[in-house]
Image (tube, helix red, strand yellow):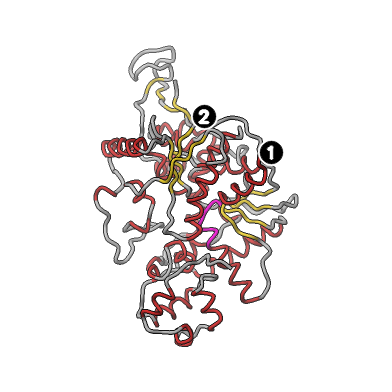
Amino acid sequence: MEAIFPNELAKQREAAGLTREELAQRSAVELRLYVELEEGRMLPTYDELELIRAQLGGIEPPQLYATSLVNSISDERYWQDSADYKRFYQSMEEAAHLLVAPEEMLWIDRHVPPDRAVDVALNLSCSTQFVPHFMLDAVAVLDALGVNFAAGASKVFCCGTYFRRMGKLHGTTRLNAASVGRMVAWGAQTAVHTCTQCVNTFSEISRRQAYESGVESGVRHTQLLRFLDERLTELGDKVPWRTEVRAKVLGHGHSDFSLVHDRAKQDVAAVARHIPGVEFIGDLDRIFVDYICNTSLRTVGFSGERRRGATEPAEENRPPKTREEVIVRRKEFAEIVASKGADTVSPQHQSCLQMWQPFASETVRVRHIVSLLAEALGVSHPDRYQAASQLGDTDAIVEQTQPIWSKWGMTRERAFQTARGMFDPAYRTTESVCACGKAPGERCGDGGEHVISVDVLSGVQAH
């Protein structure tokens, strides 16, 4: 079996002058299990890692495992007794409810009895709800490619990593078991995950259970782009292409997070090369935007906690705070992309997509490769997240999306809070103009009262 959980156990063990047998015995870890851990076929539990670390001189977890794998195990430095688990899920669900109406939603967000047998469970994950056009496109693509599947988001198919990250170790196991149970109930033998972290945590728990019980779960876990490359290759000339997509693409990902992350980054290119008209230029080197989404390089972690021992990033790598700073960075971003002969950047991870899209401009698009694929298949959806980010006016965003959030029973106050938390006015890209096209203050047929610059619902700039 391949080492899907690479680590530095052997290196650090040898540096401590210990054999496998000695480290296993001193750590009270069964030798057969330790071999599985060191060779990367399984991950240790939190307790096992603590025992092993103690015998290696108290070495920190990130010195043994990459960031994403530490998240799957748990690291006491990130624990929070005050973590609000309900609000964690609710905030992401509300983000989707601001931009996608109930009748538009193509996935289930709560437990419902299976109404058919499927081959694939598509886990759209949790944070993907901040950029729901990506979710809509992912569902539409699998449907266009003839995949028999059921799609779910948030707690329906959640991996549970957040619980371990906050120190609630058993919460992950319980939630993960419930998610796998739903997949099995639907008849799925393959679980396709948009989130790379989900792949790691589901795979870790699945392998541990198989090791301890001798019984396989019967569900294979894979990342969305890996699955799409396999499916497109399998279909070959039978892929129902509808149009060419003119785009010169630079991919982006975080290879240092885990092996799964590295493969997913490579799969941006793999999927891009299937799409008619798309030219894959290469990967974007680390630049200032990368430091914003790469939390392993930042003082503040995923959930806002300050990491012990972390150093402040250099000024040039910090997120811009004013519109003037945003304009400078957006121009710099455009120049970097243009210098490489590209016009589109495709971040692999949904959180990177969310953080990079506000830096898009007239010359540089930021689009997930799945959305480019959806366009080529003729099943793409409006990018309301991008449009709202360009608009940047919280009141205007709430007003334009009222036909959506009101159907979910959201109050205007909650919609305002959600929009304000998602879209920073500093990132707006256009000055407001009247719906008739004239500048604010000029009289027109509607009295100059409807001042808008972007149509969020259609995902485009108004003309």
In the picture, measured across the screen, residue 320 lies left or right of residue 249, that is: left
User: Is 198 a magenta residue?
Assistant: yes
Task: Please name the residue that numbered disc 1 is placed on.
Answer: 238
Residue nearer the viewer, 78 or 315: 315
Identified at 25% across, 52% down, the residue is: 314
The circle on residue 53 is none
Measured along the vertical axis of the image, is residue 328 above or below residue 451? Answer: below
Residue 296 % position (x, y): 37, 59
Residue 220 % position (x, y): 64, 60
Q: CA distance from mark 2 to mark 1?
A: 31 Å
Q: Quadrant of residue 203?
A: bottom right
Q: Quadrant of the C terminus?
A: top left
Measured along the vertical axis of the image, is residue 348 above or below residue 457? Answer: below
In the picture, measured across the screen, residue 124 lies left or right of residue 24, that is: right
Q: Quadrant of the N terminus?
A: bottom right
Residue nearer the viewer, 99 or 259: 259
Amino acid marked by disc 2: Ser
Local crowd at mark 1 within 10 Å, few (<14), some, or many (≥20)? few
Residue 261 % position (x, y): 48, 56
Identified at 48% across, 69% down, the residue is: 73
Identified at 64% across, 61% down, the residue is: 180
The circle on residue 458 is 2
Residue nearer the viewer, 229 or 384: 229
Specify the segment rendered in magenta.
194-200
